[in-house]
Image (cartoon, rainbow, N blue to C red):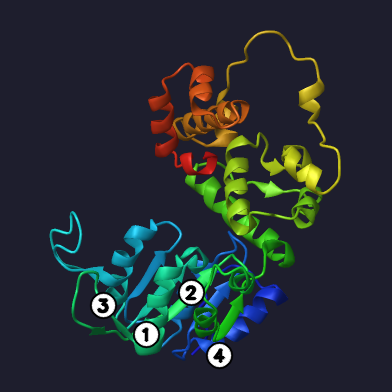
Amino acid sequence: MALNVDGIIGESPALADVFKVLEKVAPTDSTVLVTGESGTGKELLVRALHRNSKRRERPFVPINCGAIPKELLESELFGHEKGAFTHAIRSRPGRFELADGGTIFLDEIGEMDLSLQVKILRVLQEREIERVGGASIKQVDVRVVAATNRDLEGEVAAGRFREDLFYRLNVIPLHLPPLRERGADILELARHFLGRFCTDKGRKRLTVTDEAKEMFLTYSWPGNVRELENFMERLSILCDENHILPEDLPDKMWQDIGEKPRKKVEDVVVRPAGFAWPKLSDMNDKAGDLKGFLEAVEDRLLLEALDEAEGVKNRAAELLGIKRTTLIEKLKKRKLLEKNQ
């Protein structure tokens, strides 16, 4: 059966090496530890691992170990019995029980408290769990896949991660390369994200000029694929023309590649006094319909206000002449809030 990697875009040699390991390990039940910088797409890779396994028809259950307070994480993982703690008004299964027969994905495993690491080790060794407040042992048949952006060997040396658990997890190491090492995949991903956002916003598809492409390939992308996706959404809103020029790229990118930011010609010419109302031709160029055009204008003003206010929402609301709650509602509605936190 051909490897199913739907959702993972790219054909670079670095990514091809990952796929080779994925193809070999997916049909087994071996524990896998996925490593890579934040934003590289580790969960997509783990989902592909499950999709190509013998457990594909069974549950895939992810849990972010760094997003749940440590005092609640044990209950989330192993479940609890009624009355085990305050507000435990009924018994509840944990993620390991929900994943029985399938795959459990322990994301950000490096953030887990040492006391819980012992219990994860027991699951890996004995394939059994005990609910919080429970007195019975439950057998579970799960494949454990973990991921982290930390150097776990360094964490072991520092005493923050159990050495025995590290070796139990690291049966099959799978490293996802950072975006800067994926060459032409950067441009392929940029085209994909840009096409999607332009379609969502009802504007003509933007193209990237050759000079801007060179900057994309030179920039280090510290936030990896997540940064690229957010960046292409911003360009789909703020870019004035139907093609992306080097002048459209932020100062951060220019500084990273060691060059001085280039200003647009329109930024230095003398403009006539007064306000110029948009024309029908502007609407047709940007969106094609009134609703899409007005939304694009509002999106741009919201983002510019946030930029000028350096992310401080009270100040941005003042600049726009609206209430802070109104600003937050608009950001949530346009799905812009998470990009500017």
Q: Disc 1 on helix, strand or loop? A: loop
User: Which amino acid lies under the numbered mark 1 shown in the image of this protein?
Assistant: Arg
Q: What residue type is labelled 2?
A: Ala
User: What residue appears at the point 27 percent right and 76 percent down from the top-left corner?
Assistant: 97
- Residue at 58% over, 48% down: 230
Dot placed on the residue nearer the N-terminal end, 2 or 4 = 4
Counting from the top left corner in percent of width and height, residue 60 is at 36, 74
Q: Do the residues labelled 1 and 2 touch (CB within 8 Å)?
A: no
Disc 1 from disc 2: Cα separation: 16 Å
Q: How crowded is mark 4: few (under 14 residues within 10 Å), some or many (20 or more)?
A: few
One can see residue 290 in this view: yes
What's under tag 3, amino acid-wise? Glu
Q: In this view, does 274 lie to the left or right of 167?
A: right
- Dot 4 or dot 1, earlier in sequence: 4
Q: Which amino acid does label 4 sit on?
A: Lys
Q: Do the residues labelled 4 and 3 touch (CB within 8 Å)?
A: no
Q: How far apart are marks 1 and 3 (CA)?
A: 23 Å
> What residue sits right under mark 4 in the picture?
24
> Disc 4 versus disc 3: distance between alpha carbons?
33 Å
Q: Which residue position is annotated with label 1?
A: 55
- Label 2 to label 4: alpha-carbon separation: 18 Å
Q: Where is residue 162 in the image (x, y as percent from the top left)?
A: 52, 75
- In front: mark 1 or mark 2? 2
Which quarter of the picture shows residue 10? bottom right
Say above or below: 329 vs 49.
Answer: above
Q: Residues within 10 Å of mark 1 (few under 14, many from 20)?
A: many
In the picture shown, does residue 176 fall above or below 229?
A: below
Q: Give the labeled residue for mark 3.
A: 130
Q: Do the residues labelled 2 and 4 touch (CB within 8 Å)?
A: no
Instruction: Point out the tag, 3 or 2, that comes first from the N-terminus.
Output: 3
